[in-house]
Image (cartoon, rainbow, N blue to C red):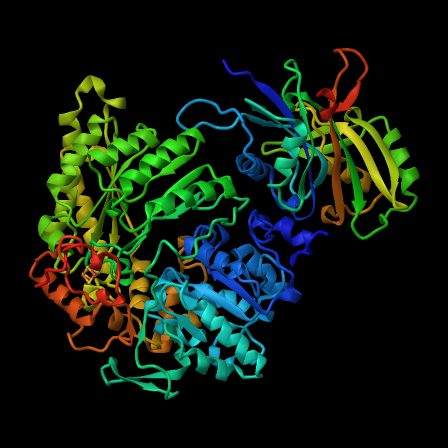
Amino acid sequence: MTRKLALSDEILMQVEKPARYIGNEVNSVIKEKDKIDVRFAMCFPDVYEIGMSHLGIQILYSMFNAWEDVWCERVYSPWVDLDKIMREKNIPLFGLESQEPIKDMDFLGITIQYEMCYTNILQVLDLAQIPLLAKDRGEDMPIVIGGGPCSYNPEPIAPFFDLFYIGEGETQYRNLLDVYKENKKSGGSRLEFLQKASQIPGIYVPGFYEEEYKEDGTIQDRKKLYDKAPDTILKEIVMEVSDTHYPMKPVVPFIKVTQDRVVLEIQRGCIRGCRFCQAGQLYRPVRERDVEVLKKYAVEMLKNTGHEEISLSSLSSSDYSQLNELLDFLIHDCNEKHINISLPSLRIDAFSLDVMSKVQDVKKSSLTFAPEAGSQRLRDVINKGLTEEVILKGAALAFEGGWTRVKLYFMLGLPNETEEDILGIGDLSNKIAATFFETVPKDKRVNGKVQIVTSTSFFIPKPFTPFQWARMCTKEEFLEKAYQTKQGIMAQLNQKSIKYNWHEADVSVLEGIFARGDRKVADVILKAYEKGCIFDSWSEYFHNDVWMNCFEKCGVDPAFYTTRERSEDEIFPWDFLDCGVTKEFLLREWKKAMNETVSPNCRSKCQGCGARRFGGGVCFESDNQNQN
Amino acid sequence: MNQIIKIRIKFAKYGTMKFIGHLDIMRFFQKAIRRADIDIRYSGGFSPHQIMSFAAPLGVGIESQGEYLDIEVNSITTTEDMKNALNQTMVPGIEIVSVTVLPDTVKNAMASVAAAAYRIAYKEGIFPIENMEQKLQEFYAKEQILVTKETKKSTLELDLKPGIYELKVVKADAIPEIYMLVDASSSGNIKPTMVLGAFCDYCNVKFEPYSYQITRVDTYTNLAKEGKPRKLVPLEAVGE
Ligand code: SF4
């Protein structure tokens, strides 16, 4: 009766955390394979603990398995120890549920959440014994599908995929699988399937297009190799988010994973329009889930998983209009059942502090502010509507409430940044520390001190943001900025209370290349993989020298993608995709940024971004439509 | 004041679940108890935890028919109900064998453990040891069974003999297996692989740990008063 595992006892006893590879978790789905028409392997190309924490996969896994004719299994990147063994022993990568090879399945769907997993995509394909290039795949190979945020610029990885699903998965997958079944039944070929698939909304078949470049390396035009392939592809989106499929029985891992809790997605999209933020544009418009539906989900999911913690997920939870009611309910219901509530991304004010004091141990928890830029001027450039006054007020309130730890997040290398902006980071950190000493009398200070952790990451311009035209800094510039930040902090009166962390610069540069890369970059990724690069997002496995060497060998200049200034009329590699937000709007925002002018959020005044055409969400709320 | 009911749960762990380590099994049960809606007691404080104690931890790779954990609950219908409710929330490879209510005076599972019995099978059928039955008798008859144990700081010489309470060959479907009953108390715990390794050495056979499937048969407590001869009973036998 026991399932036969793909790996022998001997192997499993030798690798770190064998639980990554055996499946069998609570709520994982086993089906009788003879009764199945479509076998789908769903992959997150990183280690199990990270992949298992991703809500999107849980949604699709649950939705697919709710269909009788489909069996969806999970697959993650084998960690480096097993990777080595599988190569040596020629063991094909397998699905966790059936423990059978991926290469025998119908589909391999890969969710692409961050650029630094690109070589892991190749690792998964390679270990699965599937040809790395789509054009080399035979009739019996699975169809390899990409999805997730990075598929909004799929070009650097286009040759590795048969197709991309652009947008939210709930809408077209059934359709796609039906077309597949139909094609299989009528004896259609792989090519015929791809042709039919290209007619489905949201589906992009990269093999049907070719980029033509100008002499300067920018795009001249996109040529179609299949004349019925669409010119542009509009993202798929669910408008009725309260009625869509939700994973009521998420898989519960045995080992501790990053997100070891029930995740309640309260809304999609964000009204704020921060100009550096890709998610804020990609998922427009904001669509809220009904609070009654969410309450029901919470209770049922907690019961089905036995998790001891629940967290809310959204880009900006404070903007959820029924947050008050939802939190009241959760606090009441969860307290009774000894469930912890974790509250990400709340704006710090009297309300949120009150809520946090109810669900966290104030002494142990920290407050988070993300001003992102050190001066009001630069915050206006990036349209981050957080003022120093609001931050200091929030901090004072929090210090009165007993908090002593504060985390601050900033970006370095934003467009138009000056030395003054950078010094502003230390200045603001200092003011927060000073606020502590002003608000909390000496005899009431826990250990007599306040801890401020200031972190900076490096700004990376992303497609479909107003900053897609922006120049990105070089590694040297980044490091210089980090140095200046450090000096700025060291010069402060309260510098002893401030700890400063900064992000690696090499990896940011590479991420910047991938983010706005074109198909030429694919050669480099392939070469780097062949040279042994995997798990690039893990600093201990990131080899910048190998990467730079591969760029050189392939004749691809990193600076073309990062530091080059882009003209307003440049055709970007991702322009054929339409995420709902128009290029005109983004350009308008880019110009406003250069003029240091802020834009109000969707709820106070619609900015006419283009997403209204989806016919719902925040765009149709009351009277935000008095457009200019 | 609430009444406190102490419960002892016996479970089996086998198949793929043998790869799940002790800490993860604890987490698994914490979640299972929530799924089964058991009225478990919680400690106080900001992050309350369930009152739960496991008996002897089981090494990764070992199967078991006799694992135990104790919990405290505020209320219970019947032990049978609780067993069924829990079994409905298990996964293949973990099975609740029994649920018993403990008398108040009983020490918790961890403190109670005195011994454990194991069976060792050779995964590929017959042990690669000639005359195994006789060899095992000779081995067990030795005055001392010395092994060296490597700790972080030093290597230690250890005599296993006093901690091996029984050692013999038994048959499972006509295939010989090694059976041992050994000390599993916190002070003198003997790992079955230590005994097996020493026996292989004695037979001049290379010890390949992955070639054997070890199964813990049961975990025992000692009912005898101090100084009196051992009186071992399975941990579940002290309940009602
Ligand atoms: S159309 Fe207006 S309200 Fe709708 S998402 Fe765009 S800016 Fe916001």
Residue A531: in sight, yes or no?
no
Image: B197 above or below A377? above
For residue A235, what is the image quadrant? Answer: bottom left
Vertical relation: B238 (above or below) A160: above
Image point 58% across, 83% down: which residue? A187
Q: Is residue A120 above or below residue A222?
A: above
Q: Quadrant of the C terminus of chain A?
A: bottom left
Judged from the image, the quadrant occupied by ligand 1 is bottom left
- Front residue of B240 and B132: B240
In the picture, measured across the screen, residue A396 lies left or right of residue B181, that is: left
Residue at position x 26%, y 23% in the image: A446
x and y, in percent, of residue B76 in the image: 60, 25
Q: Number of numbered discs present?
A: 0
* Nearer to the camera, B44 or B192: B44
Left or right of A480 on screen, residue B140: right
Q: Where is residue A254 in the image (x, y as percent from the top left)?
A: 55, 44
Relative horizontal placement of residue A617, taking residue B87 as reference (left or right): left
* Residue B39 visible here: yes
Image quadrant in which you'd find residue B189: top right
- Residue A376 on image: x %, y %: 10, 49
**Nearer the observer, A285 or A573:** A285
The residue shown at (32%, 64%) is: A510
